[in-house]
Amino acid sequence: MIRTLTALALAATVLTGCGGERPAPAPKQQAELPRVTGVLSTKNAKTLFGAENRGSPQKAASYGSYAKGCLAGAVQLPETGPTWQAMRLSRNRNWGHPELIDFVQDLSRKAAAQPGWNGLYVGDISQPRGGPMTSGHASHQIGLDADIWMRPADDLHLSRDTRENISSISMRRSSGAFTNNNWTRAHHEILKAAAQDPRVARIFVFPGAKVQMCNDETGDRAWLRKIRPWWGHHYHFHVRLACPKGARGCVNQTPPPAGDGCADAQAWVNNILNPPPPDPNAPKPKPKRELTMGDLPAQCASVLAAR
């Protein structure tokens, strides 16, 4: 059935930017991207992308936005390297844009220089062809997001079975308002090294960690701008790369506000410790519908179809 659908995609979709055709100039917003059309457009996107177990035989390219896109020509992070191990291998989510795979390996070498760390345990990156995941993430769709475990990678000889069952460790206290005793200066330095990489657009971590880093940093504070507070993210931190230079059809997130962002992170912490009263007039959140292929850039049809 998958092959039938992808064949239909080739007949019903404009394949701009793939299969050797020259891509259109990069749009400024997701809304400006041509969408998948035809019979394929109504199909559940996560079902189709989740069924692919290999990257597409295409030139590497990220299409769409972090939460609504796909990935051509993905590279697989090797399961084990000299300074990293990919975790939860059964998920087959250790695929990414070559720039991200290179970044992860670079950061793992820097992490290996920290006391108690031999490198990194790497969580989810993307599926082999990106796209909406079958579970767990709204983003990670274009191969430019990676989850890095907070657990120090002190053993890089874990078996596949161990990597399925071992867990990371939490760094938070008081629902994320503060760090706990698991937090070390090494965490600060690894996050700092990641944020100082020019390829990185932002890093998501729980609010208390951002405030802790703000309090502890005594040197250049410019890198703190990229560290963004967000719910969860106490077992891992989430690195997001900017669209590669010259990429067409890849949509960057709006840059973080100017400044180090420390006051904003403190406001998050204040709201955790003293939650504002609920607004009785606030509209009830609408349940999110699952993405269809028609929500994705047109190039995603050819990414699925490529064999």
Image (cartoon, rainbow, N blue to C red):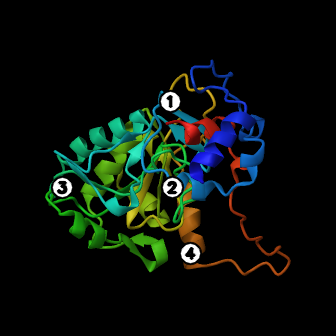
Q: Earlier in the sequence, mark 1 or mark 3?
A: 3
Residue type (three-letter) at the residue carrying disc 4: Ile
Foreground: disc 1 or disc 2: 2
- Between 293 and 95, which is closer to the camera in this rendering? 293
Quarter of the image for residue 209 reads: bottom left
Position of 185 compared to 214: left or right?
A: left
Query: Residue tagged by mark 3?
Result: 117
Q: Earlier in the sequence, mark 1 or mark 2?
A: 2
Query: Residue tagged by mark 1?
Result: 244
Q: Does any portion of residue 239 appear in the rendered image?
A: yes
Query: Residue tagged by mark 4?
Result: 272
Q: Position of residue 84 (x, y in %)?
A: 23, 50
Disc 1 and disc 3 in contact, CB within 8 angstroms: no
- Between 42 and 235, which is closer to the camera in this rendering? 42
**Residue found at x 67% / y 29%:** 15
**Residue found at x 60% / y 34%:** 250
Foreground: disc 2 or disc 4: 2
- Between 128 and 209, which is closer to the camera in this rendering? 128
Query: Residue tagged by mark 2?
Result: 51
Q: Position of residue 286 (x, y in %)?
A: 77, 70
